[in-house]
Image: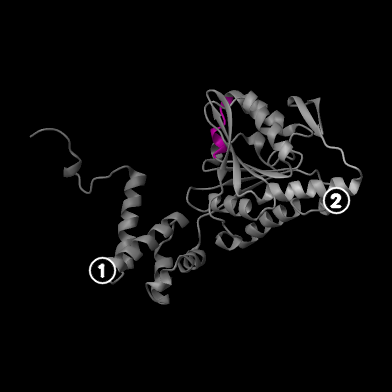
Amino acid sequence: MARVPRVTQHGLGYEDLIFGEHDEAMLRFLEAMRERQLASPKIIVFTDTKDGLEQTREPASAPVTRSDVFMDEELKTQIYRSVDEFFSRDRAFFLTYGIPYKRGILLYGKPGNGKTTLVKSISSTASAPIAYWQITEYTSSGSIQEVFAAAVQLAPMVLVIEDIDSMPDSCRSYFLNTLDGANSKEGIYLIGTTNYPEKIDPALMNRAGRFDRAYEVKPPNEAMRRAYLAYKGLNRLVDEDAVGRAAAATEGFTLAQLSELYASAALQMHYERAVHLERVIRDMRTDYDKGRSREWMSDAASRKLGFM
């Protein structure tokens, strides 16, 4: 084994060279190393700090399967199809059609509708290393260079950038230039997420080599709300008709809010031995309306401040 320095677009790097008696032995070794790497239940987390880029390995959360993801079925199929082809062992699709071996998707939409769950399901089901990059006010051109240099070494892999709209203005141009690099994303399946697509630089969107596709993760419709409430287990607390009425009455609720509805109903059943869904939904909607309006007090008199 030997370590040889080499110049890359990310700066000076090193190549570890391993010698074997013949090609078959080398292939067996590489396959064993890959299997060992994938067997690790940990994910890599890159965090930009005032002292530079910090890299840690953290235990993976409980696996999220594809059946745990509730979203438009056509959209779900498109995303998982691209993931499956990217991480197929022979990469035949990319070779057959002459498509560069890199991919970038941007997931956007209101909080609570399943972007994080979708990302976790991809992380749980892709046969590849997973890395999360936490952008902060300390993100710089230097840390961008370090992250992509490390990611290329792990490729083929998934690199997740949550809340990508928080990228500091001072290094956005460098980030775009890095994505445009000929080999900067080779073997990287890049996933960006944002709750605020209006803050995203238009230059990131729908351009080959950057984010190839942007997908909106929308709030659930009535059929999806009913399916999700059943998935959570609401039909163990109330009958099917009540589940249907709850789905109809929760127009505008996110998946996170539906989870809270189930939790509140379960608590009510546990302590009162009965569930009053209409009351729970009414109270939740009132609370969420207060959050949007910022008017937390129930009446005008109680909002007055001062002394009598």
User: Count the marks: how many?
Assistant: 2
Q: Is residue 93 magenta?
A: no
| Residue carrying label 1 | 272
Q: Is residue 219 visible?
A: yes
Instruction: From this view, report whether residue 4 is shown above or below residue 99.
Output: above
Q: Position of residue 220 (x, y in %)?
A: 50, 59
Q: Secondary structure at mark 2?
A: helix
- Front residue of this view, candidates 14 and 11: 14
Question: Which color scheme does this rendered protein use?
Answer: one colour
The location of residue 285, given as percent across then percent down, is: 34, 56
Q: Is residue 271 above or below residue 204?
A: below
Q: Quadrant of residue 165?
A: top right
First reached walking from the N terminus: tag 2 or tag 1: 2
Which residue is under mark 2?
Answer: 97
Answer whether residue 165 is magenta in the image: yes
Q: Residue at x 68, y 49 (%)?
A: 38
Quarter-wise, where is residue 11 in the image? top right
Counting from the top left corner in percent of width and height, residue 172 is at 62, 28
